[in-house]
C-alpha cells in the first residue's frame, strides 16, 4: 500500500515559513561570541569608520542612506549586531529591503522630525 504524499494549503505554508524565520532569528542571536571576536579583528578599521560616521552609532537615522549605499559601510554594519551576519541574513533579521533604490525612495517619503 502506498502512502499519500503530504500536501499543505497556503495558510500552513505561511505558518511554517514564519516559524522557520523565527527559528533562524533565534539561532543567529545565539551564535558564539568567539566567531564575532575573530571577525571583528579583521574589520576593525571599517568598524571605526562606521563609528565615526554615525557618531558612535548615535546618529544612524540621518546617516543610514550613506552607510547602506556604501559597500564598505554596509559590510561594517553587518558586524554591529554581532555575531556577524551575511547581507541576506541582515535583510531577514532586519525585516527590511536594503537595496539602494528602496532606501532612497524610503528616505524621500519619510516625514521629517
Image (cartoon, helix red, strand yellow):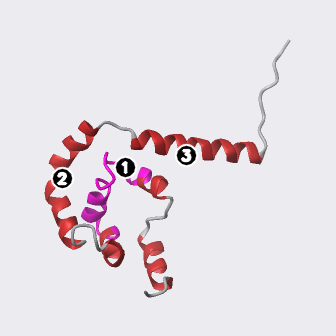
62 lies above or below 6 = below
Q: Which residue is situated farthest in the bottom direction here?
A: 112
Image location (x, y in percent) of residue 73: 26, 64
**Residue receiving disc 1:** 86
Q: Which residue is mark 3?
A: 21
**39 versus 99 height, above or below:** above
Q: Residue furthest top?
A: 1
Image coords of residue 13 (percent x, y): 70, 43
Q: Which residue is mark 2?
A: 43
- Residue drawn at point x = 32 percent, y = 71 percent: 60
Residue beneath the point at 49% across and 53% down: 92
Mark 2 or 3 closer to N-term?
A: 3
How many residues crowd around disc 2 within 10 Å: few (fewer than 14), some, or many (20 or more)? some
Query: Which of the 4 image quadrants contains residue 61?
Result: bottom left
The local crowd at label 1, few if under 14, some if 14 to 19, many if 20 or more residues have their Cα within 10 Å, is few
For the residue labelled by badge 1, is the local secondary structure a helix, a strand or a loop?
loop
> Is tag 3's residue or tag 1's residue first in the polypeptide sequence?
3
Mark closer to the observer (3, 1): 3
Residue 45 falls left or right of residue 88: left
What residue range appears in magenta? 68-89
- How far across and down, in percent of the image, does residue 25 sit? 47, 45
Contact between labelled residues 1 and 2, with CB atoms less than 8 Å apart: no
Identify which residue, 29 or 96, lies in the foreground.
29
Tell me where residue 70 sits by quadrant. Answer: bottom left
Amino acid at each position: 500500500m502506498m502512502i499519500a504524499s503530504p500536501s499543505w494549503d497556503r495558510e500552513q505554508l505561511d505558518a511554517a515559513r514564519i516559524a522557520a524565520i523565527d527559528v533562524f532569528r533565534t539561532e543567529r542571536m545565539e551564535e558564539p561570541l568567539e566567531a564575532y571576536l575573530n571577525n571583528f579583528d579583521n574589520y576593525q578599521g571599517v568598524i571605526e569608520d562606521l563609528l565615526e560616521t554615525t557618531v558612535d552609532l548615535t546618529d544612524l537615522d540621518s546617516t543610514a542612506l550613506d552607510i547602506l549605499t556604501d559597500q564598505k559601510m554596509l559590510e561594517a554594519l553587518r558586524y554591529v549586531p554581532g555575531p556577524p551576519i551575511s547581507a541576506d541574513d541582515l535583510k531577514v533579521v532586519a525585516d527590511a529591503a536594503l537595496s539602494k533604490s528602496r532606501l532612497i525612495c524610503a528616505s524621500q517619503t519619510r516625514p521629517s522630525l
